[in-house]
Amino acid sequence: SYSSNSASYTSQQLQQIANLAHADHRMYSMPTRMAFPFDLLVRSLCPTIIGNDLVKAGIILCLLGGTPPEVSGLEARSGMTIRSNSHMLVVGDPGMGKSQMLLSANQVATRSVYVGGNTASSTGLTVSMTKEAGGDMGIEAGALVLADRGVCCLDELDKMPKSHQDGLLEAMEQQQVSIAKAGVVASLPSRCSVIAAANPKTGHYNMSKSVAENLNMAGPLLSRFDLVFILRDEADTDRDRMISSSIMENFRNSDRAHVTGGDGEKNSGKLADILDQYGNFERVPLKYRLPWVADFQKQPLPMQQIKEYIAYAREYCRPKMTTDAANVLQDYFMKLRDPQNNDQKKDNVPITTRQLEALIRLSQARAKACLRPYVLREDAEDVVELMIESVKQVHTDESGKIDKTRGGAGGKSKKRRIFLEAMINSGKTSFELRDLQIIAEKLSFPISGFKDFIEDLREGGDIMRSNNGSTAIYTLSSF
């Protein structure tokens, strides 16, 4: 057996870990090298949830984490302590399996804490002071401190009051919790990844609003999440058939192949045709590769084997960045910051160096999934694809077009932005409700829900309302 300070492995466990790490070399029937260890981990995480493969891929990367700065030498060279843990937020309609995926992540992680946002407080997340028998003050660790070097799963984050959400800010970016109470001044480590799930405040995700407007959440907290995925409950015949077949299979306890029947064979045939379009040395995108692996690998890996593999990768694998991978990440970052097309320069995504650091962390985690000592080009390309999908979901408006100004901590929907610009260009400083209705008619806004739209502007701090007798007067906050 092989042991360390934190874990011990028998020769049989090490053999299983080695088999999984080299799975892509053993699958002789595969048309191309498929980065199989990573895909198998994604396939085996919460197998009862059909689809949402990219969300599962993000969860696996958060569970693995990047290379710590004290190990990579970054802290010694520059004096900077950049966090190596990634954070992820899943926003979606009820019934999309968010809590189920969080529970699976909680079970697979070696050290994890699962917290419900509706029952958590600021001190419960960070630290609290207790008075001991002798009159001395003691410190009780909260969820984020208990999850040090692990994962903290926060469900129903939108139900948590904003005053309690503030306790997450320092822990997520500085990876520590500071306390100054009752004569006690201390800093406790909270080097954990935060995987959070939230529901829109109206119960259904409104595509005409940005993520910040859909959630009852502070802007600075939103900016700390490396990946944001939006799950919408839309009618899709093929997807609905797969999900219903999977649910019936779970209750029948029968073999999956007998339940899916012709639909499963038809789906696998489509995936095989798509894979044939790529050569032996071409990279197959995640959105095609992961469904193919889920169909190819009928039985998921045992949960205990995944847990041991992730624990081993976190403990002993320390990938370093290569030039090819760094160039892929840098090119994508520059493309978002400064588009080559001059017509799109005014529509560039509000991306900062925080997102570039997120790309580096996720690429290191992607290399960890294959137990590689170096981050290869294919690792960076997979992470860029994940980030592209995340950015696309965040910036897509109700018409299906990309609205680049919806992102960031304070992103506003296009409808709100156009209306506010029209108010400014009108030359007035105060407006009655009729004046606002005239502006909306000129912009061809729908009459239904207009008062709710004005109230949203007021609650968001864009306009202010005062009363002049029985008449409501609205003014822009900037005036």
Image (spheres, rainbow, N blue to C red):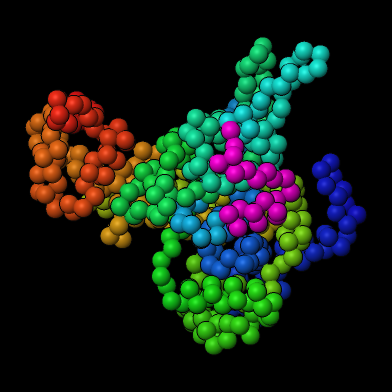
Q: Is residue 455 magenta?
A: no
Residue lying farthest to the bottom in this orientation: 262
Rendered image quadrant of residue 193: top right
Residue 450 sits above or below residue 239 on the image: above
Residue that sits furthest to the front in the current view = 470
Task: Classify the position of the C terminus by image quarter.
Answer: top left
Figure quadrant of residue 259: bottom right
Tell me if 405 is positioned left or right of 105 in this view: left
Q: Position of residue 75 (x, y in %)?
A: 63, 31
Point 85% across, 45% down: residue: 4
Give the x, y percent position of residue 94.
48, 57
Residue 103 forms part of the magenta stretch? yes
Give above or below for 355 relative to 28: above
Q: Is residue 391 left or right of residue 441?
A: right
Q: Residue 344: in sight, yes or no?
A: yes
What residue is at 62 percent from the left and 29 percent from the top?
Answer: 123
In the image, 447 versus 305, the foreground residue is 447
Q: Is residue 281 visible?
A: no
Q: Which region of the structure is painted magenta?
A: 99-121
User: Residue at coordinates 35% horizontally, 47% vertically from top-left?
Assistant: 210
